[in-house]
Image (spheres, grey):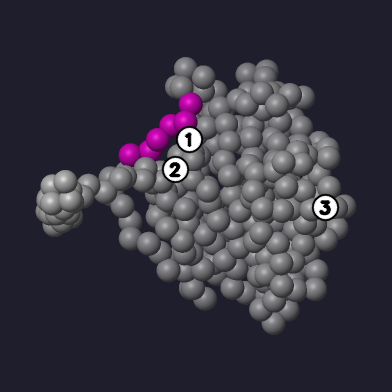
Amino acid sequence: MNTHTFLPVIVAVAFVSNVSATTLLDFGSNKLDFGNSTFSSTGMANGNTASDGGQFRWANIISVDGRTLDLIAEVSGGQYKFANANNNGLNGEFGQINVNHSTNVEFTFTIVDTGTNNAVAASAWDFALFDLDTGNKGSNIESLSLVNNGAFQSYTVTNDSELLIGGTYSEPNFTATTQGYGSDNPSDPATLTALQENRAVLFSLTDTASFTMVYNTTSGRSGRNFLFAGEAEFNGSTITLPIPPTPPVAVPEPSSSMLLLGAGLGFIIRRKRKQEA
């Protein structure tokens, strides 16, 4: 079933880097490896907001030239509510965050030096989401939206993707359309079935240490588990679309009619003052 509606492809796109090129680390062929990482949760209570602090950490997520790095996730908007905190952390080769039904929460993910909160930017790396599906009879629908800080370069989905893609060019969102079951969950991002590929989206990032996305669930009877990894191996045909940076908000110049109106009002006010004098 092909339910995605793609935005038109932009041929020429200027991407904005949010760090200096001299600070970038080259990951080469290395990927974020959740299967060999260690998970910890600090201060991430039910109902946390950005002001509460709290942090998820996947330690030893990647090692580059002898330098070990962690990945952290922090609430940066909305309110984080979970249904089962025990489901947070790791699920085989995947990272996992449990989100209760009827929840809208924004997470910022950041690569840091191990054991610290010191951000480490990389020239290019990937992050993929998997198993985006719904609960019984269209309840508990999972979706995610990007908050664009110039880090995202592109996204990739299959041509037969089940995901409904909307939003804007620079901040697309991806919504599940099909009911899922535990039996169809992926076990390895490198060995996906066709169905699992159709429920996944791969993001390519450049010149950044962090990115932000919003997890959303609709009403239902239980929580949902958002699965993610540092790669997604698609065997079927795919389409890759660019994600341009969010354009700055420009102050519109006044139109000629507005200028004439302003000049006319000024003349009327000056004339009235002369008459009163």
Question: Which of the pair 104/130 is nearer the observer?
Answer: 104
Image spot of residue 246 (x, y percent): 41, 46
Q: Residue at x 77, y 24 (%)?
A: 115
Image spot of residue 118 (x, y percent): 66, 23
Element marked by disc 2: strand
- Return the residue found at the far bottom: 137
Q: Residue at x 74, y 30 (%)?
A: 60
Location of residue 248 (image quadrant): top left
Q: Callout 1, which amino acid?
A: Thr
User: What is the span of residues highlighted in magenta in the rendered image?
Assistant: 14-19
The relative height of residue 94 versus residue 16 in the rendered view (above or below) is below
Question: Which of the pair 152/167 is nearer the observer?
Answer: 167
Image spot of residue 44 (x, y percent): 81, 44
Which residue is labeled 1 in the image?
Answer: 206
Q: Quick check: 201 left or right of 150?
A: right
**How many numbered marks, from 0 up?**
3
Question: Which of the pair 275/120 is nearer the observer?
Answer: 275
The relative height of residue 62 versus residue 275 in the rendered view (above or below) is above
Image spot of residue 176 (x, y percent): 60, 68
Location of residue 99 (image quadrant): bottom right
Which residue is labeled 3 in the image?
Answer: 46
Distance Cα–Cα, label 2 vs label 3: 33 Å
Q: Quick check: 250 left or right of 66?
A: left
Which residue is labeled 2 in the image?
Answer: 153
Residue 210: within the magenta?
no
